[in-house]
Image (cartoon, rainbow, N blue to C red):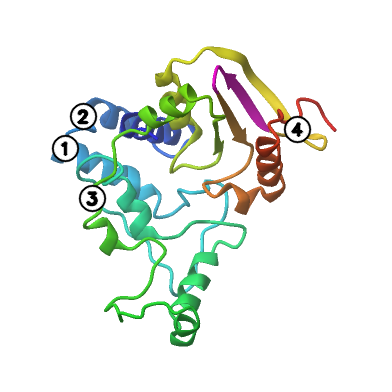
Amino acid sequence: MDDETDQKGMIDYAWDHAVISDALYHNITTTCNFSNPTSECNAELNKYFSVYSIIDMYSLYTPRCFSNSSETVTPAIKGVTPQSFSKFGMRLGKPAGYDPCASDHTYDYLNRPEVQKALHANVTKIPYPWSHCSDNVSNFWNVAPQSTLPVIKKLIAGGLRVWVYSGDTDGRIPVTSTRYTLKKLGLKIVEDWTPWYTSRQVGGWTVEYDGLTFVTIRGAGHQVPTFAPKQALQLIRHFLVDKKLPQHPI
């Protein structure tokens, strides 16, 4: 949602979840100005991203895929997010799930000629295979704003309900980043850090601000419905009917 807080939150989350060392955390936080990264900063960030070649950035505690078609690439980081940090996700192209090889299966399936023909896809015969997040797109994708906070402020001012949710095992857009971002809005807290329940289990936590609700989903990675489908459906249903999530076991 915001370049500055997304990047700071990614690094802080990785350190707090024992993904990177104290020394690397110190080096990144003392050498990196993410609005104008230097070669020294890029070198430290490469060490940070190298960890995510052996564990899943999108879901810290699920197993990795070891199929023959899997690829793991750690890119150099240049520029600012989303252009820079998004390149890692684009090149990796491996959103995780209960089947850690799910993205490999869809990659193989959607590149089959008969499947593309049935979907009326690739009618222009592009010279490269379809992928979940194409490097070809990242090469010319340069129109993303550095922050969506002005849009969120506009929605709130217009009286629209806004819920922001985050899986708490996602290292790509971690809860830490989202909390930093929401703090920038300067909204008054109406009800602070409250558990919500799925049946008798805690589904996550909520913070109700004046004009916005923040929801965490416990144990969910980047694609929340993949990891916590019941909680995701519960979240959507309560949002649509404008009801708070259950604050007590049901």
Q: On the picture, is 90 further left or further right than 206?
A: left
Asked if disc 2 and disc 1 are in contact, CB closer than 8 Å, the reply is: yes
Q: Determine crowd level at label 1: few under 14, some 14-19, many 20+ residues with C-alpha closer than 10 A.
A: few
Q: Which residue extends farthest left?
A: 39
Q: What x and y, as percent, mark residue 238?
A: 70, 36
Quadrant placement of the C terminus: top right
Q: Earlier in the sequence, mark 3 or mark 1?
A: 1
Asked if disc 1 and disc 4 are in contact, CB closer than 8 Å, the reply is: no
Up/down of 132 relative to 125, above or below: above
Q: Earlier in the sequence, mark 3 or mark 2?
A: 2
Q: CA distance from mark 3 to mark 1?
A: 11 Å
Q: Earlier in the sequence, mark 2 or mark 4?
A: 2
Q: What x and y, as percent, mark residue 157?
A: 46, 22
Choose mark 2 or mark 4, whichever is in front: 4
Residue on which disc 2 sits: 31
Q: CA distance from mark 3 to mark 2?
A: 16 Å
Residue on which disc 3 sits: 76
Q: Is residue 36 visible?
A: yes
Q: CA distance from mark 1 to mark 4?
A: 45 Å
For residue 227, the mark is none
Residue on which disc 1 sits: 40
Q: Residue type at mark 1?
A: Glu
Residue span colored magenta? 204-211
